[in-house]
Image (spheres, rainbow, N blue to C red):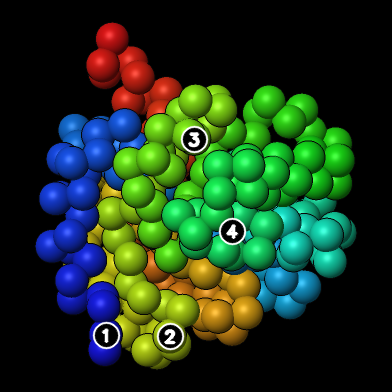
């Protein structure tokens, strides 16, 4: 069953119900965030980096600890390009299925691994996106308690099932608006198309006058607006 048609309907409901998460940026600014889950991957991520370099735009990557451990040189390349880094769990396990102790250990293991691999202060790795978007109020409470920031999405083209590049691009272009957080995948599921999809998406959205920013930038803008 294709889930893509339901994500635009689900997003405003979840955004209202769980306001502590970052679901989107400022609706008054033509800024959007391009984000990638499930990497790093030894082929797909490098192909994607070439596209991001071509357009000179920043992106945000939510990594699996096991992939960072397997492909440290890829992780280092992403960080050295100046992209923003976040957590997606170690093994892509659903957070609600983990005990509080397992959950905390999973995040800390992944955070320390990224920090050591990229020679980065662990305190700068605070953003967490739940695998498959699955969470409970308790999940969010624990993340906040441990000093993490919950990052969600507003545009999900379901690229992990490989519906075809035209379908992915079309969904993103139709759904993107000011402040959108776009989710694509550069891992084993969906990553084979990610560079070509990103190339078309970036070109089209730049033509529409959007500016690409990191997740951290959206957080800062959101906090300023609240203040």
Q: Nearer the viewer, residue 211 or 140?
A: 140
Query: Is 147 rendered above or below residue 143?
Result: above
Q: Earlier in the sequence, mark 2 or mark 1?
A: 1
In the rendered structure, are the residues bearing label 4 and label 1 in contact, judged by CB atoms less than 8 Å apart?
Answer: no
In the rendered structure, are the residues bearing label 3 and label 2 in contact, judged by CB atoms less than 8 Å apart?
Answer: no
Q: CA distance from mark 3 to mark 1?
A: 30 Å
Horizontal placement of 102 versus 26: left or right?
A: right
Q: Nearer the viewer, residue 101 or 164?
A: 101
Q: CA distance from mark 3 to mark 2?
A: 29 Å
Q: Secondary structure at mark 3?
A: helix
Q: CA distance from mark 2 to mark 1?
A: 9 Å
Instruction: Residue under label 2, please give it.
Output: 161
Q: Nearer the viewer, residue 217 or 202?
A: 217
| Quadrant of the image containing the N terminus | bottom left
Q: Earlier in the sequence, mark 3 or mark 2?
A: 3
Q: Residue 52, labelled with which disc?
A: 4
Looking at the image, can residue 180 be seen?
yes
| Quadrant of the image containing the C terminus | top left
Instruction: Residue under label 3, please give it.
Output: 143
For the residue carrying disc 4, how many other residues have a C-alpha within 10 Å: few (<14), some (14-19), or many (20+)?
some
Q: Secondary structure at mark 1?
A: loop
Q: Secondary structure at mark 2?
A: helix
Q: Earlier in the sequence, mark 4 or mark 3?
A: 4
Q: Position of residue 41 (x, y in %)?
A: 71, 71
Q: CA distance from mark 4 to mark 1?
A: 29 Å
């Amino acid at each position: 069953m294709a889930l893509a048609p339901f994500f635009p309907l689900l997003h405003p409901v979840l955004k209202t119900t769980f306001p502590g998460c970052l679901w989107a940026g400022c609706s008054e600014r033509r800024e959007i965030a391009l984000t990638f889950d499930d990497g790093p991957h030894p082929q797909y991520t490098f192909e994607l980096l070439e596209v991001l370099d071509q357009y000179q735009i920043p992106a945000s990557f939510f990594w699996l600890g096991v992939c960072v451990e397997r492909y440290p040189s890829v992780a280092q390349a992403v960080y050295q390009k100046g992209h923003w880094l976040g957590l997606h769990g170690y093994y892509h396990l659903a957070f609600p299925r983990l005990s509080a102790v397992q959950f905390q250990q999973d995040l800390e293991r992944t955070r320390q691994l990224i920090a050591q691999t990229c020679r980065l202060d662990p305190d700068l790795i605070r953003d967490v996106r739940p695998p498959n978007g699955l969470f409970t109020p308790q999940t969010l409470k624990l993340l906040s308690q441990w000093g993490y920031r919950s990052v969600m999405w507003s545009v999900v083209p379901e690229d992990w099932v490989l519906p075809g590049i035209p379908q992915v691009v079309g969904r993103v272009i139709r759904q993107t608006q000011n402040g959108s957080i776009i989710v694509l995948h550069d891992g084993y599921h969906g990553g084979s198309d990610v560079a070509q999809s990103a190339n078309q998406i970036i070109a089209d959205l730049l033509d529409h006058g959007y500016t690409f920013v990191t997740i951290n930038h959206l957080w800062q803008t959101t906090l300023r607006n609240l203040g």
